[in-house]
Image (cartoon, helix red, strand yellow):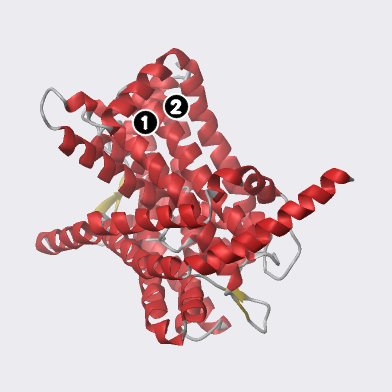
Amino acid sequence: METLNELIRSIDGVVWGIPLIVLILACGVLLTVRLGLVQVRRLGTALRFMVQNEEGDGEVSSFAALCTALSATVGTGNIVGVATAIAAGGPGALFWMEVAAFFGMATKYAEGLLAVKYRVHEPDGTMLGGPFYYIERGMGKKWSWLAKLFAVFGLCAGIMGIGTITQINGITSAANSFFDPDALHTVTILGRPYTLTTVIAGLFITLCVALIIIGGIKRIAQVSEVVVPVMILLYVGSCLTIVIGHITEIPAAVVTILQGAFGLRAVAGGAVGTAIVLAMRSGVARGIFSNEAGLGSAPIAAAAARTHEPARQGLVTMTGTFIDTIVVCTMTGLSIVMAGSYDKGLEGVAITTDAFRYGLPFPEQVSAFILMICLAVFAFTTILGWNYYSERCLSYLIGGANKTVTLVYRWIYVAAVAIGPYLAVEAVWNLADIFNGLMAIPNVIALIALSGVTAAETKDYLSRLKAEERAARKK
């Protein structure tokens, strides 16, 4: 088994190596240039459109589609991923995470635009869209093999790890660390001991997942519209409390981050280049994993939005990266750097827990409880979002939406969630990482190939939008 785990780890390292990271970043840079810094010039418009729904073809509002995408992206990566990046690459990793997010906003914009432009309207009212459709319909039928590859990778990522086993395991682990860290209350299942907390939390989450996902995208969107904003406000509010409570420490933290980003602290040791590469690799890789810009997951949700304008939905989709990384990950990173938690020999969620205990004006148990709730809800919503993503991948592979097949798949997905707490997750996390990386390859190829279409659509829409804004000002 250890040999298999080592093989999976090696493949993961190859897939998420420098070439893929450079490819995703290069795509973001190309789109930023071709779209004329749309993520800067139209960020205000995008944030306004985010809460200003439009009527049109689609299954859910633009805001609900965004929340569905955020339910999958704002997750454990924002708590554990940021901590892991800073622990591995130093405080400078946070800077490179922001750089990746800046260019990733242009990538997400293109994904949302193309998802709506090339989506398919099924007879039953279902909207099917995402990379597989803009590859096939935008690049041509001869590229359908590439679209199928994306769908296979997306389906595997959802059912085999990132959407099921790893998330439910994260929830039960967080509950265990708070309620029964010494495993004093256990039961034996199939010859192995598990805490009562694991069993109870696992059953409860599985039941909640079943009640929501059996209802499809509309029910997932309804839950996401309520849970995601509250979840983000609670977590960002906690981080802001830490930052504001230690506001005098911000300048020193910013200096530490910038020094780490450019290897300035390593000058004396002569390892400047190594320090920069390590910070860059850790920050960019974890940033991409957190906000999923370039992976091709968010456009699957964007395709369901009620809108007539592909570019408008592109703007709304773009705000997902802004919220996920520029806001949420920045708050997490600042809290960790200010507390110095990354330099205490801790790992994973323990790093962020230490920052919360250091910075929040509450007893340590209360601070740990707040983080546990955030982590549990983040992981739960990721389960919901990835169910929808992988379900749409399945629909593409079987030639369209099929109610019977879809229902069977949903129950299989629920079963995967149910068994998740009782499985070892290291290999599953690495498998999920591999499939996420493999998803990005066909998607980024399509984004680059269709960048001219994206630029033309954007130019046309923004010229019409400017005319409307001028007319409104004259009234």
- Per the image, the residue denoted by label 2 is 367
Q: Residue furthest top?
A: 248
How packed mark 2 is, by other alpha carbons closer than 10 Å (few <14, some 14-19, many 20 or more), is many
Badge 1 is on which residue?
A: 353
| Image position, residue 109 (x, y; %) | 53, 57
Say few, some or many: other residues with alpha carbon within 10 Å of mark 1 (under 14 / 14 to 19 / 20 or more). Answer: many
Residue 247 drawn at (x, y percent): 47, 16
Q: Identify whether 268 is placed above or below 114.
A: above
User: Could you tell me which secondary element the residue under label 2 belongs to?
Assistant: helix
The residue lying toward the viewer, choosing from 464 and 21, is 464
Could you tell whether 102 is left or right of 344 in the image? right
Q: 357 and 15: which one is in front?
A: 15
Which x, y percent locates residue 30?
A: 42, 57
The reply to whether dot 1 and dot 2 touch (C-beta < 8 Å) is yes
Q: Quadrant of residue 402?
A: bottom right
Amino acid on which the number 2 mark rests in the picture: Ser
The kind of secondary structure element at disc 1 is helix
Which quadrant would the N terminus be assigned to in this image?
A: bottom left
- Give the quadrant of residue 153: bottom left
